[in-house]
Amino acid sequence: MSEAKAAAPTRPKAKKGPRPKHVPQRTCVTCRETGAKRGLIRLVRTPEGAVEVDPTGKRNGRGAYLCNRVRCWERGVNDRILGRALRLEGLTQENREALLKYADERVPDDEDEDE
């Protein structure tokens, strides 16, 4: 019986390369497209109820992500989409103005993306 085990062919072990790096995926609350976490901008509801941009992605509080499209920012801020995602009654006028100002300064125009 030991001869049968010895006669069985053995397969050479396949060489394994390094594991691929895990890239966390997040979804834009406005357009519902998924992308890499670093490619989206995180907004956070602070314990005081204010909404702020979280460039580090690590601040405490309820978070929501928006992509780099001006129309997603405008729709998310003006419609109730962002408030719903952050579980707020509604955004204050100060929060709306600050977020739209951030979008105007930092989010590139997406006129050439229209199809």
Image: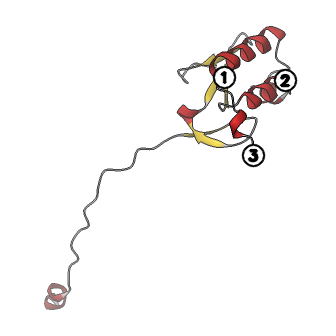
Q: Nearer the viewer, mark 1 or mark 3?
A: 3
Amino acid type at mark 2:
Asn
Which residue is depicted at the point 39% across and 49% down? 20
Residue 62 at x, y = what percent? Answer: 67, 24
Circle 3 residue: 115
Q: Toward the viewer: 112 or 45?
A: 112
> Considering the numbered disc 2 on the image, is that residue within a helix, a strand or a loop?
helix
Residue 110 in the figure: left or right of residue 93: left
Q: Which residue is mark 2?
A: 78
Between the residue at mark 1 and the residue at mark 3, the CA separation in whole angstroms equals: 28 Å
Q: Earlier in the sequence, mark 1 or mark 3?
A: 1
Residue 39 vs residue 59, the one in the foreground = 39
In this view, 21 is above or below 47: below
What secondary structure is found at the residue carrying circle 1? strand
Check contact, mark 2 vs mark 1: CB within 8 A. no
At x 69%, y 39%, the residue is 113
Along the horizontal axis of the image, is 98 left or right of 11?
right
Amino acid type of the residue tagged 1 in the rendering: Leu
Depicted 61 relative to depicted 12: above or below: above
Q: The N terminus lies in which quarter of the figure?
A: bottom left
Residue 43 tag number: 1
- Residue 57 marker: none
